[in-house]
């Protein structure tokens, strides 16, 4: 991927550099899940679900990369208060470029997961690194144009996802939306259940969790 290339995501062309993950179609399901929670239709002619959150809810995109998720959420839900974080300063620069390009008012924060996040949020969304380098079907050559830090994780690809689940549970975040390979879903659901999260819905690669009986 060359400097300043454009990749379409949810109908918008985002600037992409070698410092960020290339947006993929399956990640668009995260946007659909958020729209569903605030009662907005995500497909023409489809009746929206009953809103579980107000449109002015607070949403955090963890590991934002290019900013495609955060910017899209803000453009689709203008009333929402959207923040986005990443551990990479270079990635945040790309995300800020995209936010300016689309006139999206997103608050960007440099943070390793939630470690530098001081606010609470109604929804946390995340497309974190979840590829297991030991998967025999992974085409590492094809992925070599993207940053390894945005692709690979330890513990079968779930190390960062587990950390985020634990952190979100401690903060009593009501909704947690995660992307992962379907082969990992069962392990993620089991781990989330042990942290008081119940599975709300599955959309392709996307898992939506709701916090039940928050710990006191």
Image (cartoon, helix red, strand yellow):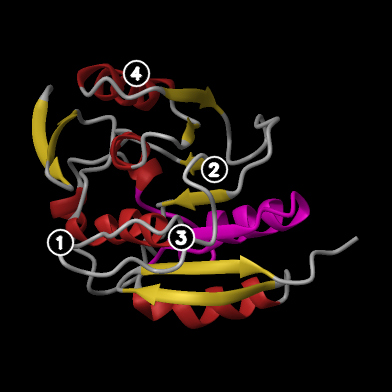
Where in the figure is residue 173, as x and y percent of width and height? 67, 53
> Which structural element holds mark 3?
helix
Q: Residues within 10 Å of mark 2 (few under 14, many from 20)?
A: some
> Distance between the Cα atoms at labels 4 and 1?
33 Å
> Which structural element holds mark 1?
loop
> Distance between the Cα atoms at labels 2 and 3?
10 Å
Where in the figure is residue 73, as x and y percent of width and height? 35, 42
Query: Looking at the image, is 204 positioned above or below residue 119?
Result: below
Quadrant of res 150: top left
Choose the circle earlier in sequence order: 4 or 1.
1
Please report the residue visible at 40 percent of the width from the left and 52 percent of the height from the top: 127
Please report the residue visible at 33 percent of the width from the left and 53 percent of the height from the top: 31
> Which structural element holds mark 4?
helix
Q: Which mark is residue 128?
A: none
Q: Residues within 10 Å of mark 1 (few under 14, many from 20)?
A: few
Query: Does residue 15 appear in this view?
Result: yes
> Distance between the Cα atoms at labels 1 and 2?
23 Å
Q: Which mark is residue 44?
A: 1
> Bounds of the magenta span?
151-180
- Residue 160 appears left or right of 146: right
Choose the circle earlier in sequence order: 2 or 4.
2
Q: Which residue is mark 3?
A: 37
Is 175 in the magenta? yes
Query: Does residue 1 appear in this view?
Result: no
Q: Foreground mark, 4 or 1?
A: 1
Image quadrant containing the N terminus? top left
Please report the residue visible at 36 percent of the width from the left and 61 percent of the height from the top: 131
Q: Which residue is mark 2?
A: 57
Query: Looking at the image, is 91 positioned above or below residue 177?
Result: above
Q: Which residue is mark 4?
A: 93
């Amino acid at each position: 991927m060359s400097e300043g290339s454009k990749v379409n995501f949810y109908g918008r062309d985002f600037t992409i550099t070698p410092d960020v993950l290339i947006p993929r179609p399956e990640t668009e399901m995260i946007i659909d899940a958020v729209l569903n929670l605030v009662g907005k239709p995500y497909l023409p002619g489809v009746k929206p679900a009953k809103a579980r959150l107000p449109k002015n809810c607070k949403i955090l995109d963890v590991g934002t990369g290019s900013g495609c998720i955060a910017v899209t959420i803000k453009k689709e839900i203008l009333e929402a208060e959207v923040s986005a974080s990443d551990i990479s300063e270079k990635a945040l620069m790309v995300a800020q470029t995209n936010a300016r390009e689309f006139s999206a008012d997103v608050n960007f924060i440099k943070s390793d997961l939630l470690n530098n996040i001081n606010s609470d949020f109604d929804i946390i969304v995340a497309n974190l690194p979840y590829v297991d380098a030991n998967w025999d079907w992974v085409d590492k050559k094809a992925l070599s144009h993207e940053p390894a830090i945005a692709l690979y994780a330890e513990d079968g690809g779930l190390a960062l996802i587990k950390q985020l689940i634990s952190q979100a549970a401690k903060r009593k975040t009501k909704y947690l939306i995660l992307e992962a390979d379907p082969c990992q879903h069962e392990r993620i659901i089991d781990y989330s259940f042990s942290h008081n999260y119940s599975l709300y819905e599955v959309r392709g690669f996307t898992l939506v969790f709701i916090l039940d009986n928050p710990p006191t």
